């Protein structure tokens, strides 16, 4: 397989004549059902775990309870814009083999660090960690947290973030650690959905 390099932005990138097959990438002779479950689907589970965000489980339901369906018109607009956003980054990632933040470093160091900080404050702390902390604080308090519980929410968010970093640091490989966690996490989520669906349907029919 011939390789050469070209420069895209500030950094060089390797160019190949042929995209490697999954067997080449994972160094397997043949990919069967066992290999799909243990190797291929593990990476897909990481992407699936990331795609099920706090908006669907925390922000959306919270706003629906607070305001009703008056903001439902935002859902198709948000889904449409998010689909374009994700598809664009996915195409770039497939073409270059690099993550969005790495691609931003090709523009310049300032763009890369700006993208990394944007992910940290826009998603991790401002989104996932903070909203997870609101849910955790609500479970501790037994009610919806209010402004008076800001300290508890902040402490809970910090603890959750540190536990996430600790979990990844203890694993031998970050990717493998995320695969195992998402097998457990997504299994619990989907099993809970099935049980809740059966329960709600049964109580609705019997009631």
Image (spheres, rainbow, N blue to C red):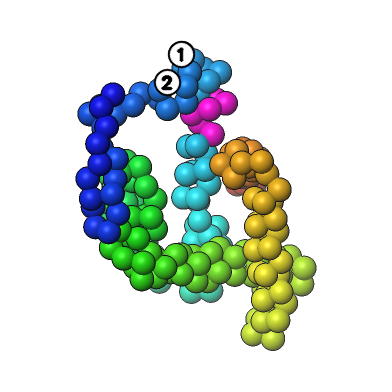
Where is residue 22 shown, x and y percent of the image?
40, 25
Q: Residue at x 33, y 60 (%)?
A: 104
Magenta includes 87? Answer: no
2 vs 135, nearest the viewer: 2
Q: CA distance from mark 2 to mark 1?
A: 6 Å
Circle 1 crowding by C-alpha within 10 Å: few under 14, some 14–19, many from 20? few
Q: Residue at x 49, y 61 (%)?
A: 55
Helix, strand or loop for disc 1? loop
Residue indicated by mark 2: 23
**Residue 184, quarter of the rendered image:** top right
Is 156 positioned to the left or the right of 11 in the image?
A: right
Whether residue 69 is visible here, answered yes or no, is: no
Tell me if residue 159 comes above or below residue 3 in the rendering: below
Point out the image quarter for the N terminus.
top left
Where is residue 69 shown, x and y percent of the image?
43, 67
Whether residue 162 is visible here, answered yes or no, is: yes
The magenta segment: 37-42
The secondary structure making up most of the magenta span is helix
160 vs 12, nearest the viewer: 12
Tell me if residue 116 comes above or below residue 48 in the rendering: below
Residue indicated by mark 1: 30
């Amino acid at each position: 397989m011939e390789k050469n390099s070209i420069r895209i932005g500030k950094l060089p990138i390797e160019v190949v004549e042929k995209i490697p097959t999954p067997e080449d990438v994972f160094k397997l002779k043949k990919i069967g059902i066992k290999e799909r479950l243990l190797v291929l689907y593990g990476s897909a589970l990481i992407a699936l775990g990331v795609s099920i965000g706090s908006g669907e489980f925390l922000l959306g339901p919270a706003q629906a309870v607070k305001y009703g369906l008056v903001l439902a018109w935002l859902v198709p607009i948000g889904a449409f814009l998010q689909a374009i956003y994700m598809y664009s980054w996915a195409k770039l990632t497939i073409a270059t083999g690099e993550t969005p933040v790495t691609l931003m470093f090709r523009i310049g160091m300032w763009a890369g660090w700006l993208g990394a900080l944007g992910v940290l404050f826009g998603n991790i702390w401002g989104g996932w960690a903070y909203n997870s902390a609101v849910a955790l604080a609500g479970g501790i308090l037994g009610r919806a947290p209010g402004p008076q519980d800001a300290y508890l929410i902040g402490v809970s968010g910090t603890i959750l973030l540190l536990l996430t970093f600790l979990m990844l640091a203890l694993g031998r490989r970050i990717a493998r650690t995320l695969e195992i966690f998402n097998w457990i996490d997504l299994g619990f989520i989907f099993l809970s959905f099935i049980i809740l669906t059966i329960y709600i349907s049964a109580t609705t029919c019997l009631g």
